[in-house]
Amino acid sequence: MTYIRPKFRHPELPKNKLGYSVDFYEGALSTLCAGCGHDSISAAVVEACFDLNIEPHRLAKLSGIGCSSKTPAYFLSNSHGFNSVHGRMPSVATGANLANRDLIYFGVSGDGDTASIGMGQFVHAIRRNLNMVYIVMNNGCYGLTKGQDSATADEGSKSKAGSVNPFQAIDLASLSLELGAGFVAQSFSGDKKQLIPLIKAAINHRGFAFINVISPCVTFNNNPGSTKSYDFVRQHVEATATLDFVPEMEEITTNYNEGSTQQVKMHDGSSIRLHKIAQDWDPQNRISAINAIQKARSEGEILTGLIYIDEELGELHEVLQTTDTPLNQLTEEVLCPGSEALSEINAGLR
Amino acid sequence: MEPTDVNNPEYYHKVVDCQYACPAHTPVPEYIRLIAEQKYTEAYMINWESNVFPGILGRTCDRPCEPACRRGRVEEEPVAICRLKRVAADNKGDVKKHMPVAPFKPNGKKIALVGAGPASLTVARDLAALGYELHLYDEQKAGGGFMRSQIPSFRLPESVLDEEVNYILDLGIHTHFNTYVKSLKSLLDSDYDAVFVGSGAPKGRDLDIPGRQEAAANIHIGINWLSNVAFEHIHKIGKKVIVLGGGNTAMDCCRTSRRLGGEEVKVVVRSPFAEMKASPWEKEDAMHEDIPIMDNHVPKTFVVENGKLKGMTFEKVHAVYNDKGKRSLVPTGEPEVFVEADDVLVAIGQENSFPWIERDLGIEFDKWDMPVVNETTFCSTNPKVFFGGDAAFGPKNVITAVAHGHQAAVSIDLHCKGEDLNKRLSPFVNLVSQKMGIHEWSYDSAVVEDVRYVVPQADKKVTLKDRKKEVELGFDGLTGFKEAQRCLNCDMQTVFSESKCIECDACVDICPTACITFTENADDESDLRNMLKVPATNKTQDLLVSGVLPTKRVMVKDENVCLHCGLCAERCPTSAWDMQKFFYSVTKASKVCH
Ligand SMILES: Cc1cc2nc3c(=O)[nH]c(=O)nc-3n(C[C@H](O)[C@H](O)[C@H](O)COP(=O)(O)OP(=O)(O)OC[C@H]3O[C@@H](n4cnc5c(N)ncnc54)[C@H](O)[C@@H]3O)c2cc1C
Ligand SMILES: Cc1ncc(C[n+]2csc(CCOP(=O)(O)OP(=O)(O)O)c2C)c(N)n1
Ligand code: SF4
Ligand code: SF4
Ligand code: SF4
Ligand SMILES: [Mg+2]
């Protein structure tokens, strides 16, 4: 019996600008069930970080509890990581981000972790526009605790045991739009072509970037009648657009015909190029985005792709006007300027 | 592309790189696993069935399997396939009880075999149990052909050769040693039902340059000299020796010279070192015995003084390649080089020669005076006369002679039964799932990272004094086990059933060597190759292409660097991937193992 991933890699693996090949971004061997959608998302994260030439020590992975929240162990072994308590990842992320604004914060959560126990934390992270990526690996159930319906399970969806969910689902993408998130996307674990550029764009977005990824639980929620099974999702996804993430330095050479292509410039000079499928939708208009997602829902479809983006929104540090130097780098001298400085301040308040 | 036809046994056969490259298609990974399990007897028998001379080949094979070995594409060095075979031979138990036992019920047919080299011996082994009366002729005093007369004892001990030759002779073969066949016509005129010609390529090429005649006493044709040494007609050579030629014969000549009193032995070769015909390991062994190899030297004259050889002169050249990559050796213009010598061995090639075959027997000869032989049936244009080994298509090696022998035996059997030679049985194949449970396969699927182990050698001080002392000591059991574990088990096929696939990508994500891609199909193979996760640039390796999946895509697996680790199958939630053991065995004239 063996369950060891060989060290050998394809001898012709390409290298990125830092000289690393993709295996440098891998993590430990996954212990999730064979075929779990979450593993595909991990693989997409690995690809995205490789493509973006991210130095692994510049990224911190944060998660709560659940099969989904275990995944940070399975990608980016060379990055920082914090596996927090159930539903509490946003507070840990907030603390870490405030202390060191220089890192990329990559949060991973589940639908249980986010839409039930962690809901209170989730909404406040959006409200504050915390600069982070927040991925929900959404399988409509509590995978780790054996597949109970979660708050994102669709009404009428059938569990493996045959019970039908009587409650309405919380739609996390609509909720984040409603709460004013500046980056809202939705995707499917089985569609890396879409997921990888979305993750890249989310990492490059300044502020809270939310991606709701439908990620089938093969063990507890992949049965006929489930609306989160591979088959059901494949039959019901409807993409807003196909998209490419275009890094800053890459010149745009292809000409797309007006109207069907939209270029969204990001704050750092990179951009997202969208080849639109949904014509009456404008990803830079919140009302249009809300309409598109609601319309798809009413038709029983799952709208995927980039749904809304606002590159102008100020993130938490800008709102709070914190120093450019990360707080954790400030020395005691700077933080405690001494009694003279205190007297000056006090004098100023008189 | 069309879905791959995996029902064609050659598809999976090709995935087992070593077996596919082996002329006799020895089931390599199967015997390597048996060695790891210390089942040496079984490992030996698998070899014996397939290549007839495991102990001999485990020491001397040209190893076409090793350059083909997948391991060489994944890391630096292939598995030491050849030397593992020796581990089986050295440690085996009673193998005779698994071999057929004479006497066999006669079938009334009589066959003559000319030459007792590996080709004829293979024919004899395959036909004996069927009741043929087999008459083996050789001008030498014992069987083995070139394996006895050419391959020196320090590479192949006589005891090993005798043992394996005798396994065959014990099957009731009628031997006629010390008998040169002077006329094929006389054989055909006697009551033989068929004649197999396994007479090899026994003529050494000479070098006709100035001084050749005058110095004849000290100039020897390599293969004649080696056979004189082997049969103890020659016991010594001068202190200073030049060996001309860059092939394996040259390597055997120079190393033998070192053992017969040659102190300053030099190999001089026309071509650049890297392009010499000798196997890299033979060059290494020669240099290890303090034999310099002078490359880019073209022989000009034998220098004779007072009727005695003094040495040779050479012109220095360098290789120039034209647009088509064709090489020519162009003189550098430097002064000629003189090399002193007491004796010169000419090892610049061998040729076929059939002075004993009359040209009016219905056997067609081509413009190079080679018999016209069918490459599948090994039949000449005379339906009663078959050729194999070096006699068929020129000098090759032992394993090729064996492979020819198997096919010739099938043909001779068909011929004697009055059947069509082209109605040959397909190979025996078998494909069986190896799944034993979750994460549990019937083979060691873990891929070890060890680099190739080096075969230990006896001390040079000892081996150079005794031409019969074997140089290589062979792997001990533990090292043999470790080397065996390097094998990637390429016969454990990744079998894909598209009807079970739910396209969850689990296999794509887990595969360490990025073999698997789900993609839109392409009409053209080279387009599809470029669309893969890592483009499939090694065109000698096939793509496994599935039928169309529900998302309209196809699964494409590049077989090139698959580690056969089984992770795709472990990760697949629906067992759309399965690891199945593929067994492939060339059908022989008779079943020889039990
Ligand atoms: C120096 C040297 C080293 C070699 N080393 C290796 C090695 O390490 N590994 C390897 O795989 N191969 C090696 N080879 C090649 C290998 O020996 C041959 O390819 C192989 O033996 C061919 O087998 P065969 O059955 O065709 O004939 P052979 O082995 O050549 O046997 C032919 C026999 O027929 C006999 N014969 C010929 N004509 C007649 C006749 N008219 N009547 C009676 N008898 C006759 C000959 O005496 C000879 O014994 C070496 C060759 C040489 C010259
Ligand atoms: C405070 C607390 N309450 C309950 C649990 C039990 N628990 C563990 S994981 C989990 C739900 C996980 O669901 P989700 O976030 O959707 O992750 P999945 O396993 O489906 O990926 C629960 C309720 C816990 N670990 N901690
Ligand atoms: S239980 Fe479900 S979510 Fe958890 S690892 Fe297994 S398939 Fe994935
Ligand atoms: S790894 Fe093993 S099975 Fe594969 S080619 Fe090499 S020896 Fe043969
Ligand atoms: S056995 Fe499967 S996972 Fe392992 S290298 Fe081959 S294709 Fe990849
Ligand atoms: Mg869940």
Image (cartoon, coloured by chain):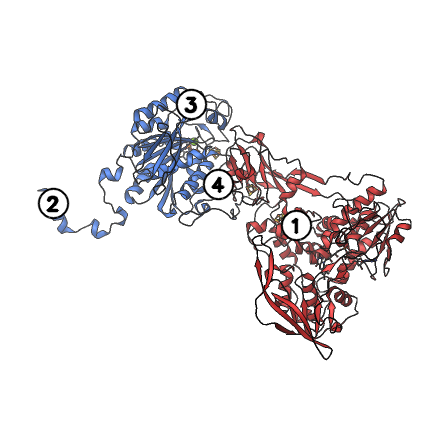
State the residue position of label 2: A346
User: Image point 82% across, 49% down: which residue?
Assistant: B363
Circles 1 and 3 on the same chain: no
Judging from the image, mark 3 belongs to the subunit labelled: A
What residue sits right under mark 3 in the picture? A301
Secondary element at tag 4: loop
Q: Does mark 4 fall on the same chain as mark 2?
A: yes
Assess mark 4: CB under 8 A from ligand 3?
no
The red one among the chains is B
Residue at the spot of label 1 = B32
Residue type at mark 3 is Glu
Which of the two discs, 3 and 4, sits closer to the camera? 3
Distance of mark 3 from mark 4, alpha carbons?
A: 31 Å
Ligand 2, by image quadrant, is top left
Nearest to the eye among marks 4 and 1: give it: 1
Task: Give the number of the disc on residue A30.
Answer: 4
Distance from the alpha carbon under mark 1 to that under mark 3 = 55 Å
